[in-house]
Image (cartoon, grey):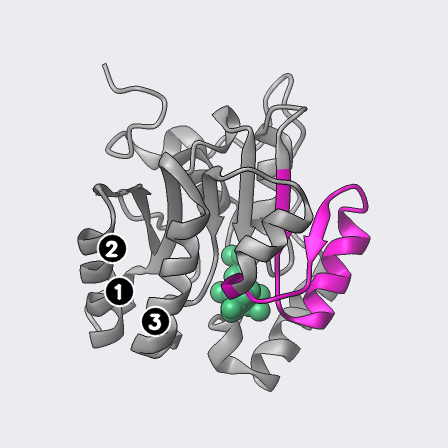
Amino acid sequence: MPDNNDITSNCSSATTAKTANRPEIIQPQSPGKITFLKEFIRSPKNIGAIAPSSSDLAQAIVKHSAAAQASNILEFGAGTGVFTQVILRDKKPDANFIAIEHNDSLSKMLRQRFPDTAVVTDSVENVNQIMQQHNMAKSESIVCGLPWTAFSQDMQNRLIMSAISALAPGGAFATFAYWPLLFLPAGMRFRKMLYKLFTRVEISPIVWKNLPPAIVYRCIH
Ligand SMILES: C[S@@+](CC[C@H](N)C(=O)[O-])C[C@H]1O[C@@H](n2cnc3c(N)ncnc32)[C@H](O)[C@@H]1O
């Protein structure tokens, strides 16, 4: 029997948007999408996508990050809040949660959208300081939306080391990669790095309902 976090189970089991006791997942409205596109045009290397992720990808990545079981949760590169919304729905009521987003316009939008959530406008490279400032212990769950293939090798290294330094032993780091970009040098380099640095790495089935389709990496510290 696969456990709840078994990434080899079909992602579609994590895609139910509305059930009797779960609120509906609301996609960002047009202003959010327009801001995202504007920020992409302004800084394509940092944003790394022309549109926010789909609800299917959000549900798959949050499931595989085990955020529902965690007491300390981090989100990296929260964008318009597509993953944030699912984390807030699924997390334990008393779990600590910090969303980190270094783009000013997007983090301002996140604060308006989630006024009760700790949204920090900063780079993930400063995650340890951010955790200290918020009295947060090492995290058992990181949900990461950073655009890895847009980064240089040096940047990939620095950011992945920040993630590892923020994780509790056995903690889960979930991130995604666009399926068509997996075989580009930056995509292959990133995958190699994950296998080298984490105790265990699992890859989800392709989430087709995303533009472009994507896979989720679930990496255990
Ligand atoms: C591909 S978008 C993903 C946004 C959202 N999670 C989603 O899936 O729709 C990547 C996000 O990571 C943010 N980002 C990039 N580098 C970052 C860094 N070093 N620290 C924090 N956020 C960063 C970008 O500003 C952007 O909002």
Q: Which residues are magenta?
A: 97-125
Q: Name the amino acid, label 2.
A: Leu
Does dot 1 land on a helix, a strand or a loop?
helix
CA separation, marks 2 and 1? Answer: 6 Å
Q: Name the amino acid, label 1.
A: Phe
Q: Position of residue 167 (x, y in %)?
A: 42, 43
Label 2 close to label 1 by CB (< 8 Å) = yes
* Above or below, comparing residue 30 to residue 50 in the picture: above
Foreground residue among 107 and 130: 130
Indicate which label's residue lies in the foreground, 2 or 3: 2
User: Is 81 placed left or right of 15 in the picture?
Assistant: right
**Mark 3 — residue?**
149
Q: Inspect the magenta stretch and tell me whether residue 160 lies in it.
A: no
User: Is 160 placed left or right of 101 in the picture?
Assistant: left
Label 2 close to label 3 by CB (< 8 Å) = no
Foreground residue among 203 and 192: 192
The residue shown at (51%, 51%) is 54
Q: Name the amino acid, label 3.
A: Thr
**Mark 1 — residue?**
190
Does dot 2 land on a helix, a strand or a loop?
helix
Q: Position of residue 171 (x, y in %)?
A: 38, 36
User: Which disc is residue 81 wearing?
Assistant: none
Label 3 vs 1, first from the N-terminus? 3
Please tell me how crowded label 2 is: few (under 14), some (14-19), or many (20+) other residues with Cα within 10 Å. some
Foreground residue among 134 and 217: 134
Q: Position of residue 175 (x, y in %)?
A: 39, 52
**Mark 2 — residue?**
194
The residue shown at (22%, 74%) is 184
User: Is 72 placed left or right of 57 in the picture?
Assistant: right
Which quadrant of the figure has residue 154? bottom left
Indicate which label's residue lies in the foreground, 3 or 1: 1
Label 3 close to label 1 by CB (< 8 Å) = yes
